[in-house]
Image (cartoon, rainbow, N blue to C red):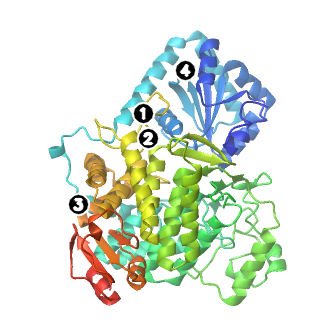
Amino acid sequence: MNRLAEETSPYLRQHKDNPVDWYPWGEEAFERAREDDRPVLLSVGYSACHWCHVMAHESFEDPATARVMNVLFVNIKVDREERPDVDAIYMDAVQAVTGRGGWPMTVFLMPDGRPFYGGTYIPTDTFQDLMSRIAVAWNEDRDQIEQQAAQLSEAIQAGARIGPSDLAPEERPPISPALLDGGYQALRSAYDPEWGGFGGAPKFPQPTMIELCLRAHAHNASPDTLGMITTTLDAMASGGIYDHLGGGFARYATDRTWLVPHFEKMLYDNAQLAQVYLHAWQLTGEPRYRQVVTETLDYLLAPPMRSPAGGIHCAEDADSEGVEGKFYVWSADEVRAVAPAALEWYGVTEQGNWEGQNILWRPVRGDLLRPPEIEEARRRLFEARAGRVRPGLDDKVLTEWNAMAAAALAVAGAALGEERYLSAAQDVGDFLLRSLRDSDGRWLRSWQAGRTRHLAYAVDHAWLVEAFTRLGEATGQAVWIAEARSAADDLLRLFWDDEGGGFFTTGNDAERLIVRSKDLYDGATPSANSVATVALLRLGTLTGAERYTNAGSAVLGTMAPLLAHHAMAFTNFLAGVDLVVSGPTEVAVVGPRHDLVSAVHGRYLPNTVLAWGEPYDSPLWEGRGDGLAYVCRDYACQAPADDVATLLSQLGAA
């Protein structure tokens, strides 16, 4: 057994019995490398990563390969989900070397942490040969390795400087509708009109891109924009990427038609997609989108994803019993024996649609509402599947992803009038407050079985601001706004870059790595800086605290040159642009007028904030009469509304 047995990361513990002499990330490993004059072999992955498991089986479980690793290198294993700071820095190095990235990530480092070579998945024969060649170079051509380390380190440093613009404020593009239009046009160019989504295979859900389309439709009411939204959402929810029995989405589809998923299911995908489908339901009223929302959230709130302690676990693997997708696929005979009525509904054939098996899907896109006999068939299949060996579970709880889930649950519970989601949102929020802060009140990143690890990052704080603000709007409880302000103040105090603007990934009290980077690009999850921008703008509008709105606007200002030229990489930033360009609408409902509150919650109003219930320190509460709703812009209000029709008319949402 190596040093990983006591780690909180399930991914690290999966490697505890490897013959590799693994170290967790830390000074002990680098000190050993310096003492022995050996390079470091850094391996980064995560629990739900299929190819991580493949490389582990081929190389890290193989005694011969492990002997080479142990003799030639000091070996460090990192969970990218626990240490996104480490992952981001060395992923930049791998992309500089290979032109692409991915996991597992394998990087060779100097004993001071500087990278000199790297790649992703490496077959075992190639891996052994690569290690031997690197060892020869280390012993015989150290100058070349030192030169490569210097070049890669400079590339990483240069990448870390991207973002906060070197242009003077007067030279930067203005925050204007042109930025939004550029982003929308970029999405239209990448859109697949037949199967939805953006780009070709492999095809990812891209929630922030769909959200930008939803925002565009709120402005242009274009049938073409609505078609982009509905075609994409219908194709995803009809395809095999959606779990038609248990709810929730797999990570991505390997094909253009969304049929064949990469079967792992991540908390962050499902939290984001639940909100996307909710907004589509608010926009269209289509019950099929509501069904996807409830099934997705119910998946997150059921075992094994829900922790008995109150948080939500990270992910389920793609593999069970060592076979990718085995838990999810069916033969025609299996379906026929359990629920023959489901054969046609789920497109089941004798020959199957993937490796001789059937991935359940809906051949009629968008026809998702099950008649009673099909619902009974679904229930029987679900119960039969429950008897199978379930995929591996990553049972750590991350602050970022749980705050994301709390926000989704709060917004959905308020919009749908579903108390169980509001209650669950508060439970997750309470769990975060109770379990993921240290004795000094410093937020932490990761929890597993009662143990916490790692100082929280900027992205954790940004999502906490978003989640607590949404909880305040959903419940009318002032305590959540107070917690949002506290998290926002920590975000500004620990992560703000006084010189360049924007937020560093790590706090000023964190471990010093070879570079202090910034999370800027919106990918599978929105970047720390874009989430912070939107969350701070909304919280500042609710509270009247200019330090929040000023910080959010400042980030947008420094990012404007990148937004103007690379919109597809910054789609969540464009939500912040929309908020600034359109101007937020403030709604205050005073007194017990739940009809007025529900009317606001039920509509898609992306640039509206809502204050109701318990008053807190904000201009929105000043001089308001009981039993009325006030619709304001810049705290200048229209005539009070005392009925739903008037309120919706003032909001332009009648």
Q: Residues within 10 Å of mark 2 (few under 14, many from 20)?
A: many
Left or right of 424, for residue 61: right
Which label's residue is closer to the chain start, 3 or 1? 3
Q: In the displayed structure, would residue 436 be above or below residue 342? A: above
Query: To which quarter of the image does residue 243 belong?
Result: bottom right
Query: In this rendering, which labeled residue sits more in front, label 1 or label 4?
Result: 1
Which label's residue is closer to the chain start, 2 or 3? 3
Query: In this rendering, which labeled residue sits more in front, label 2 or label 4?
Result: 2
Q: Are marks 2 and 1 in contact (CB under 8 Å)?
A: yes
Pick whichever, 272 or 64, lies toward us. 272
Helix, strand or loop under label 3: helix
| Residue 156 visible in the current orientation | yes
Which label's residue is closer to the chain start, 2 or 1? 2
Q: Quadrant of the N terminus?
A: top right
Query: To which quarter of the image does residue 110 belong?
Result: top right
Pick whichever, 143 or 193, lies toward us. 143
Residue visible at 52% across and 20% down? 112
Where does label 4 land, which residue?
110
Helix, strand or loop under label 4: loop
For badge 3, the amino acid type reads: Ala
The image shows residue 406 at horizontal and vertical percentages of: 52, 62
Where does label 2 land, which residue?
505
Q: CA distance from mark 2 to mark 4?
A: 23 Å
Q: CA distance from mark 2 to mark 1?
A: 7 Å
The image shows residue 430 at horizontal and vertical percentages of: 56, 59
Q: Residues within 10 Å of mark 4 (few under 14, many from 20)?
A: many
Residue visible at 54% across and 63% down? 271
Where does label 1 land, which residue?
516
Where does label 3 land, which residue?
178
Which label's residue is closer to the chain start, 2 or 4? 4
For badge 2, the amino acid type reads: Thr
Q: In the displayed structure, would residue 40 be above or below residue 550? A: above
